[in-house]
């Protein structure tokens, strides 16, 4: 298959490429800095600005699938989380809308439309949840900043459906990877013997092992019945308190020092919602279509990621 990936240089994109390459797919990545992409030689890297379809739109003509993951990091690219200043919030939203509009324009211009689009998304769609209600893909959108971003991000690619392109929306949870993303900073306090639940620890953590994330993206790409929204989360989400005790057990570190919510809110501002809120999202539609998770339970997932030699 010829697969075009935006955001292919990111955490999920790189893992997806590593997963797809052995099957000899023809992969093209769109990057704002192709010279720094550092992807395997077999991958074609094409420059774009993440805003317009000029100069690169031909690459989606005749492609089998487009996977649209590009967007400014939500937690910040540095080692420490970066506060959501008004300027960062604007970049988080606009980077996703601009990139997705550019992808939709390129698809509209293609003489041979790609057969399908995997639209990046997040379980933040459902908003910061305060109770224990399980959320499948029929749950309504939330009303906070991230829910608003994600709702608009998804909507920006809706036009491709009228062009006959199958669209699967990947509402991804917290991707657990040893290579980056949220897991290494989450585990740092444990490594320093300071680990424990965040806030009251009752918030849900809709996690997914990076391997299942890329397997699910590939599944959505090749499964002809996959259209509409899919929660990419393990079937057994845990509370933050459970996460802390499992992480402590796997790392053989204490896990009882809870970080008070007011201090986290003071330090991180509105962004503290990433740590103090969550969603009890379930992968109903993936399971209905027969997708099987390699890592349905958190403890084996963490053991695989953290103790693999
Ligand atoms: N990781 C998670 O836990 C998680 C959970 C839910 C949803 N998601 C979503 O899934 C997508 C991929 O996640 P990820 O963790 O792989 O993200 P990532 O590591 O931050 O990579 C995102 C990629 O998007 C591109 N990008 C960054 N800022 C951009 C901008 N202003 N305009 C256009 N492109 C830009 C970058 O590619 P270039 O620099 O090469 O252009 C970058 O490699 C993201 O949109 C993220 O919000 C991730």
Image (spheres, rainbow, N blue to C red):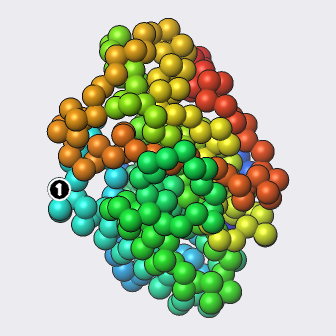
Q: Residue at x 18, y 37 (%)?
A: 267
Q: Residue at x 40, y 15 (%)?
A: 256
Residue 159, quarter of picture = bottom right
Q: Which residue is mark 1?
A: 85
Say whether residue 60 is visible.
yes
* Rendered view: 26 above or below 105: above
Q: Residue at x 66, y 81 (%)?
A: 165
Q: Quadrant of ligand 1?
A: bottom left
83 on left or right of 34:
left
Instruction: Say whether mark 1 is within 8 Å of ligand 1.
Output: no
309 on left or right of 166:
left
Q: Position of residue 289 (x, y in %)?
A: 80, 58
From the image, which quarter does the C terminus lie in?
top right
Q: Neighbour class for label 1 at 10 Å: few (<14), some, many (≥20)?
A: few
Say whether residue 29 is visible.
no
Residue 230 versus residue 128: which sits nearer the camera?
128
Q: Position of residue 122 (x, y in %)?
A: 49, 57
Q: Position of residue 189 (x, y in %)?
A: 34, 20
């Amino acid at each position: 298959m010829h697969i075009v990936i935006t955001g292919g240089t990111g955490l999920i994109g790189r893992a997806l490429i590593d997963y797809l390459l052995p099957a000899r797919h023809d992969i093209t990545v769109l990057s704002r800095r192709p010279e720094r992409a550092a992807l395997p030689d077999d991958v074609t890297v094409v420059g774009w600005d993440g805003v317009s379809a000029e100069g690169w739109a031909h690459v989606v003509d005749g492609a089998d699938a487009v996977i649209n993951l590009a967007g400014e990091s939500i937690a910040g690219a540095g080692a420490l989380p970066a506060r959501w200043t008004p300027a960062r919030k604007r970049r988080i939203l606009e980077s996703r809308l601009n990139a997705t509009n550019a992808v939709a324009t390129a698809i509209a211009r293609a003489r041979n439309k790609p057969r399908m689009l995997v639209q990046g998304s997040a379980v933040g769609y459902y908003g910061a949840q305060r109770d224990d209600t399980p959320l499948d893909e029929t749950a309504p959108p939330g009303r906070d900043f991230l829910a608003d971003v994600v709702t608009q991000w998804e909507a920006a690619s809706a036009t491709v459906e009228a062009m006959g392109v199958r669209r699967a929306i990947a509402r991804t949870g917290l991707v657990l990877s040893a290579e980056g993303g949220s897991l290494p900073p989450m585990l740092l306090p444990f490594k320093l013997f300071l680990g424990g639940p965040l806030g009251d620890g009752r918030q849900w953590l809709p996690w997914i092992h990076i391997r299942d994330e890329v397997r699910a993206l590939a599944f959505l790409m090749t499964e002809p019945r996959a259209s509409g929204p899919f929660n990419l989360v393990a079937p057994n989400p845990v509370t933050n308190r459970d996460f802390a005790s499992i992480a402590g057990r796997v790392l053989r570190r204490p896990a009882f020092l809870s970080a008070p919510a007011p201090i986290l809110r003071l330090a991180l501002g509105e962004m503290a919602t990433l740590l103090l809120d969550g969603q009890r999202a379930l992968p109903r539609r993936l399971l209905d279509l027969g997708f099987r998770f390699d890592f349905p339970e958190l403890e084996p997932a963490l053991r695989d990621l953290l103790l693999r030699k």
